[in-house]
Image (tube, rainbow, N blue to C red):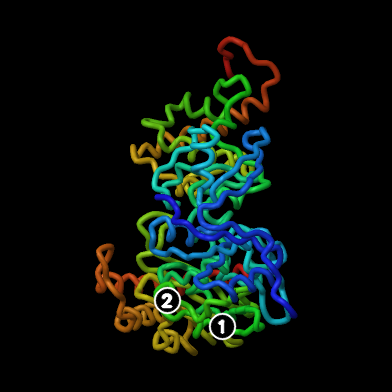
Amino acid sequence: MKMPTFTYHRPATVAEALAVLASEDDAKILAGGQSLIPLMAMRIGQPEHLVDIGRLDELDYIERRDDHIAVGALTRHAAAEDSALVQTGAPLLAAALGHVGHRAIRTRGTVCGSLAHADPAAELPAVALATGATFIARSTAGEREIPAADFFQGYLDTALEPNEMLAEVRFPLWPDRAGAAVVELSRRHGDYALVGLAAAIDLDDAGTIGGAALAFFGVGSLAVRIAEAEESLLDKTPGAEAFAAAGRIVTETIDAVGDNHGSAAYRNHIAGVLTTRGLAEAFDSIGDRV
Amino acid sequence: MTDTPTPALRVDPGGRIGVSMTVNGTAISTDVEVRRTLADVLRDDLDLTGTHVGCEHGVCGACTVAVDGQPVRACLLLAVQVDGTEITTIEGLANPDGSLGPLQQAFHDAHGFQCAFCAPGVLITTASLLETNPTPTRDEIKAELSGNLCRCTGYHSIIESVETAVRLTAAGAKSTDGGDEEASNA
């Protein structure tokens, strides 16, 4: 499969990249290209213009700020995976990165690229939903913040306007006494998950559950959180009983979409199993962190 | 912001662009159409057909090469993106006289491959792994090679070959002079 033709732009500054997005119809940002290039090879997407930001080093950063970890548009998965800042400040992101493709994909693919691609079977959109990440969209008109809950609109569809670039994503700083886990069922390590879960759990002073986030991927056209199951965990003693009860609620509620890789009923069931497993793993990880 | 800046570089559809890179230690400058991948340029323009192209959408791993020391899929990179980089392909793992390099020899000794279509990607991935982790565990080897499909399904012999390479490297580092006849080991 060979690429369709396109006009290639290599801007020297971010302002130049934004100017191309503003002036050309059907322009796409090329960062790592690990999602975009296969889409083009398979003719699922044929953008007329590619804006290669691969040399804009100012977009390649991971920073700890007052209340969040900021990841720039050109930060590769592998750089985030190896980052001590991410491991301590955004452990749910850290837990997800090892599941993203394979190392040879992660050396090129970018965190923001995975998010802007918005594949509902991918790990990072679920991480953004579970953590309440904030997306920074930039255009020649300026900058705006988009909450994760509003960013993902449908299959490969986001709130980004055609003239906007996802310039940065901000993950809220991880609280003390909180645990993270990403668990998934896939046919092969590194493949897209049939069903996956990004789970976060935090404990209050009494040691009971103060908050939980359960974001599932691979279950439909969007990653979803199951609020009923999250709420069922509040004020409970963390342990097998509470986790299994949350799993049963997930199976009853999630309403996954089936396809030829797995029926809806199968995915609903697996989502419940992963809930029990993921919560236990997230809870166990609290001990590692405190 | 006053007037809109002009993009530093713009190439129209079908247009070509100069790309300079170092491939297996040799500096190369060539003209490529912007939509062509690194795999295309290596195989078709530079005649380095050791890099195999399987699925052409990043799944099979056969086209894996090292760019600035990092394993990447040559089918998922436009050649223009690697302008100015250093690239190692399977040909770069051989000894300068063309004989098998140590990693290749280990796979040969351990009968690592059946049809060997996946070999270039497996060897480059293994070379990258051993550079950062010279003594990987079996689980680490499996995790690292999970992105390389072998449709002969000869995964056990591949993993054993990596373990052979690790052993040979460790032994080579210890022994000061080779050529002894079968040493009787205590």
| Quadrant that contains the C terminus of chain A | bottom right
| Residue A239: quadrant of the picture | bottom left
Viewer-closest of B69 and A35: A35
Instruction: Say whether residue B95 is left or right of residue A101.
Output: right
Q: Residue at x 62, y 43 (%)?
A: B133
Q: Position of residue B78 (x, y in %)?
A: 54, 51
Residue pointed to by mark 2: A223
Mark 1 residue type: Leu
Q: Is residue A63 above or below residue B116?
A: below
Q: Nearer the viewer, mark 1 or mark 2?
A: 2
Mark 2 residue type: Ala
Viewer-closest of B120 and A195: B120
Q: Residues within 10 Å of mark 2 (few under 14, many from 20)?
A: many
| Residue A276: quadrant of the picture | bottom left
Q: Position of residue A80 (x, y in %)?
A: 62, 63
Q: Position of residue B175 (x, y in %)?
A: 67, 22
User: Tag 1's secondary structure?
Assistant: strand
Q: Residue furthest top?
A: B181
Q: Is residue B42 above or below residue A9?
A: above
How far separated are the C-alphas under marks 1 and 2?
A: 25 Å
Q: Position of residue A168 (x, y in %)?
A: 63, 74
Viewer-closest of B121 and B9: B9
Q: Residue at x 35, y 57 (%)?
A: A187
Query: Disc 1: which chain?
Result: A
User: Tag 2's secondary structure?
Assistant: loop
Q: Residue at x 56, y 12 (%)?
A: B182
Q: Residues within 10 Å of mark 1 (few under 14, many from 20)?
A: many
Q: Is residue B28 above or below residue A214?
A: above
Residue pointed to by mark 1: A203
Instruction: Say whether residue B118 is left or right of residue A72.
Output: left
Q: Earlier in the sequence, mark 1 or mark 2?
A: 1
